[in-house]
Image (cartoon, helix red, strand yellow):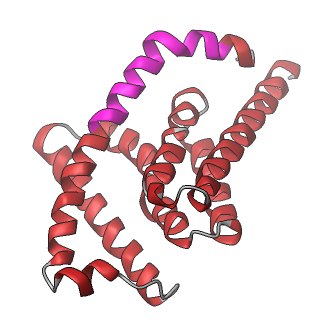
């Protein structure tokens, strides 16, 4: 029983560290506003450690905690919404999808998830937080479609980068990390 309790304590501590680092990264959007999307994406990447070493259930718990803190505390609501609607849950759902699907079907589901998440996020940004979408006014009515198409390209690159980070973590960093945390 003592060993299991220690493991849960370690898992909780790791979750707290990942949550704190994630919120800190997203707070940097107030200092560097051009990273409104990059910093929530980096915060989401931290969940990879939770998914691999602790489990998806714990990762969802950290995602929920970071999401609530981000929405309540972050001055950059756009960054918070992008984390909540996509970057926070995607590393977890990516692991689930990759367990269940392969090939073209996997990419169909991933792209569908991305597009639904991003459209929902922008609807919340526009209508709940009432943050204006300047690109639409500046570039015309086709700006939304162009940005969504560009977003899909960037998403594919992000997904491939996440996969490679998982590989690097598993091959190079995991052993040292687990030793450090005494897993």
* Above/below status of 100 relative to 154: above
* Residue that sits furthest to the right in the current view: 2
Q: Residue at x 56, y 58 (%)?
A: 29
Query: Foreground residue, 57 or 76?
Result: 76
- Name the quadrant containing residue 73: bottom right
* Above/below status of 30 relative to 44: below
Quadrant (top left, top right, bottom left, bottom right) of the C terminus = top right
Residue 21 locus on image (x, y percent):
66, 42
Q: Is residue 41 shown in magenta? A: no
Residue 174 locus on image (x, y percent):
55, 16
Left or right for 170, reference 24:
left
Residue 122 locus on image (x, y percent):
37, 76
Magenta span: predominant SS is helix
Q: Residue at x 55, y 38 (%)?
A: 46
Q: Which residues are magenta?
A: 160-178
Query: Foreground residue, 111 or 132?
Result: 132
- Name the quadrant containing residue 50: top right
- Name the quadrant containing residue 54: top right
Q: Residue at x 45, y 81 (%)?
A: 124
Quadrant (top left, top right, bottom left, bottom right) of the N terminus = top right
Q: Residue at x 74, y 42 (%)?
A: 16
């Amino acid at each position: 029983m003592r060993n299991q309790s220690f493991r849960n304590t370690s898992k909780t501590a790791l979750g707290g560290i990942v949550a704190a680092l994630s919120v800190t990264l997203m707070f940097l959007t107030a200092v560097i506003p051009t990273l409104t999307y990059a910093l929530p994406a980096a915060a989401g990447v931290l969940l990879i450690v939770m998914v691999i070493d602790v489990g998806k259930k714990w990762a969802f718990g950290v995602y929920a905690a970071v999401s609530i803190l981000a929405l309540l505390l972050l001055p950059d609501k756009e960054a918070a919404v992008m984390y909540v609607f996509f970057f926070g849950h995607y590393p977890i759902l990516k692991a689930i999808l990759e367990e269940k699907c392969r090939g073209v079907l996997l990419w169909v589901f991933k792209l569908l998830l991305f597009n639904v998440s991003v459209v929902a996020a922008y609807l919340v940004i526009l209508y709940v937080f009432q943050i204006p979408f300047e690109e639409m006014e500046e570039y015309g009515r086709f700006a939304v479609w162009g940005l969504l198409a560009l977003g899909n390209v960037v998403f594919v690159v992000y997904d491939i980068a996440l996969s490679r980070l998982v590989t690097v973590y598993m091959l190079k960093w995991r052993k040292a990390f687990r030793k450090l945390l005494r897993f």
